[in-house]
Each structure stands twice: as structure tokens, then as C-alpha cells.
Amino acid sequence: MTVNSSERRALALGAALTAMLLVAACGGSGEPTTRFHASRVIAFGDESSLIVDTRGDANGNKYSVNATVSSTDQTIVCTANAVWSQSIAAFYGLVFPECNPAPNAVAAPTSRIRAAFGARAGDLGAQIDAQQADSPLGPSDMTTVLIGEHDVIAEYQKYPAIGVDQLIANVEAEGAEVGRQVNRITDTGAKVLLSTIMDVGFSPFGTAERLAHADTDRAALLSQLSQRFNASMRATIVNDGRKIGLILLDELTTSVVKFPGFQGFSNAVTPVCDLTKSALTPPSILDCTAQTFVANGSTAYFWADDLHMSASAQIFFGTAAISRAQNNPF
């Protein structure tokens, strides 16, 4: 499959940045005395961690670039172009039910995706509740948490009717709520791989907002709100270095955009998916593949659309998360 070469490329790209991300993310000192191995992976958050089984065939689609068998066979291959939570599951030899296709399907997989499209900080508690009601979390579970991008966007969209100081207070409250819910997960004994949200100001959405408004630098405002959300979340978590592994997606996005060509990403400005080619209503990257790229688009693009990472970026991010899981003294 043509997707394999891009996946190998992205994994190679991830190696160099991984060390930087993990040093910055380290929550404690010391090496793991025994290697933690998860019996399940439970994914919480928004659509960046989501696989959608749209056809009911356990071969779901992602809010990224979806792999296909070939340029002529458009059958989705969900096991390739992994989203970050899926990479973590694969590291432990696990699969999610939404990507468990025949003929090699795993019988009754117990890992779960609780993440949902558009989820915000206030939804995280309900996701945890749903998991606890179904099968409570415990010490052998690894969880992934990435949520908050939609909080930042929702607060930003209240500007200028609501002033910057109040918007900052709002995102800080939402970041703190994520921190509290992460602490709630650790209280069960489960491990957490927690990611900061991307710096939305450096996304194509942020760039477009800067160009569309003359009242203030809208991208800078989005960056400020993203930073304050992340800072509040990080200040709220209770981490002795053995409960939570932190991955810095905000630093990844800013590095890729600020330094053209960083780690081989040739385009960190333009989305690679051409939504005019989407067959969905409304148009969505859920059906984006290499065959629906913009002209001259490639796997070296960082963005799939204006707010979501491409497959290469997701794999790159997943590589950093795997290293965090390996090196954190859980």
C-alpha cells in the first residue's frame, strides 16, 4: 500500500522531536522500576482521538487523512495512518473496536474510544462516567486525554462582545476542569497520557482569522487563549511523575509553523485536504484520502484541514506519545 511509505517517513521524522518533547514534558524524576504494560487503552477527548465506524465494518474513518488500499482501490485501511491514541493502543498490542477489520479481527477487544467530535472540557466528565459505568478504570489501564481546542474556539468566537480578560478567565476555568478530570482518572489507579492542546493561533484557522479581521491580531488572541488553557490545565493536575505522562502538542505546532521545513514538513500553512472533493454533507475530512488532496498536496503537509492534523502529523505526535509512555516511570 502506498500509505506504508508515508507512515514510515512520519515515524522517522518523529524520532528527533520526541526527545525534545519528552524532556519538556517530564513530570518527575527517576526511571521506571518495572515496565508498565496496559491491558486496555481508553481514549478520552475530541475528534483528534476518534475513529468513526461509519459503515459498521470495524474499518473506521478518522478526522485526518485516511489511508486507502491504493490509488485505484479506495477501500479504507483504518490500521494505517493511525491517530495518536491508536498508536498508543498498537504499542501495547491492542486495538479499538472501531478499527478491528476482518480477516484478522481481535475477538472482543476491551479498549474503548470515549472521545467525541466537538467535545469540550465540560464533556470530559461524562466520558469518564460512561467508561466507569461500562467497565471501571483500574491500575492496568492506560488512558489518553486530548481536549480543549473547541473550548478555545468557542470562547474566541465571543470576541469582541466579551473582552479578552473575561475570555482568558473562561479558558482558564475550562483548562482547570480538564485538570480536575485527569486527577479523577488517576484516582482510579489508571495511567494517563495527557496532551496539551495545539496552539490554535498557528493553525490555518488562526491564519484565516488574522486575515479576515482588522480589529486586532486574531491569531495572537487564539494563541493567548490556547496558552492560558494549557497553563491552567497543567497547574491543576496532581502529578508526582508516576501518574501522568505529558506531551506538548502546543510546542510541536508552534515549532512546525515557525521553522519552515522543520522535521521535513514542507507545508505547515495550507490544509492538504480539498473539501470540495468531499462526498459528505457538510464536507468533512472524514472522507479525505490522498486522492482528495489539493493540487500538489503531499504527506509532508502538517494540516489535514484548518484545525486538524494530517496523517503524518498524527503519526509524528503518536511517536512522541509512545516514547513518553515508554520513559515515564508509571
Image: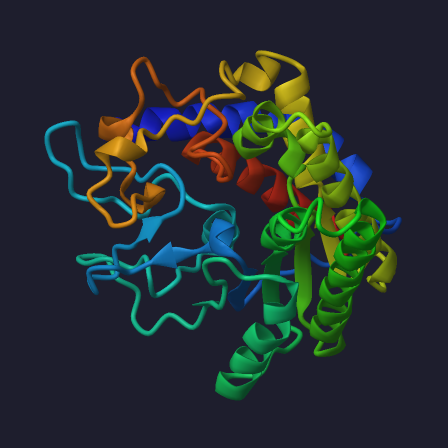
Query: Residue 233 at x, y = what percent?
Result: 79, 56
* Quarter of the rendering occupied by the N terminus: top left
Query: Residue 321 at x, y = what percent?
Result: 62, 45
Which residue of the protein is positioned furthest toward the left in this rendering?
72
Using the rendered view, name the quadrant where residue 311 is placed: top left
Q: Is residue 9 above or below residue 40?
A: above
Using the rendered view, name the quadrant where residue 119 is placed: bottom right
Going by the image, does 8 lie left or right of 229? left
Q: Is residue 322 above or below residue 178?
A: above
* Quarter of the rendering occupied by the C terminus: bottom right
User: Quick check: can you spot residue 299?
Assistant: yes
Using the rendered view, name the quadrant where residue 175 is placed: bottom right
User: Quick check: can you spot residue 18?
Assistant: no
Query: Residue 223 at x, y = what percent?
Result: 72, 36
Residue at the image point whose x is 41% and y is 44% from the top: 82
* Nearest to the observer: residue 156 or residue 327: 156
* Nearest to the observer: residue 176 or residue 164: 164
Going by the image, does 165 lie left or right of 289? right
* Nearest to the observer: residue 314 or residue 11: 314
Residue at the image point whose x is 29% and y is 48% from the top: 282
Which residue of the protein is positioned furthest toward the bottom in this rendering?
133
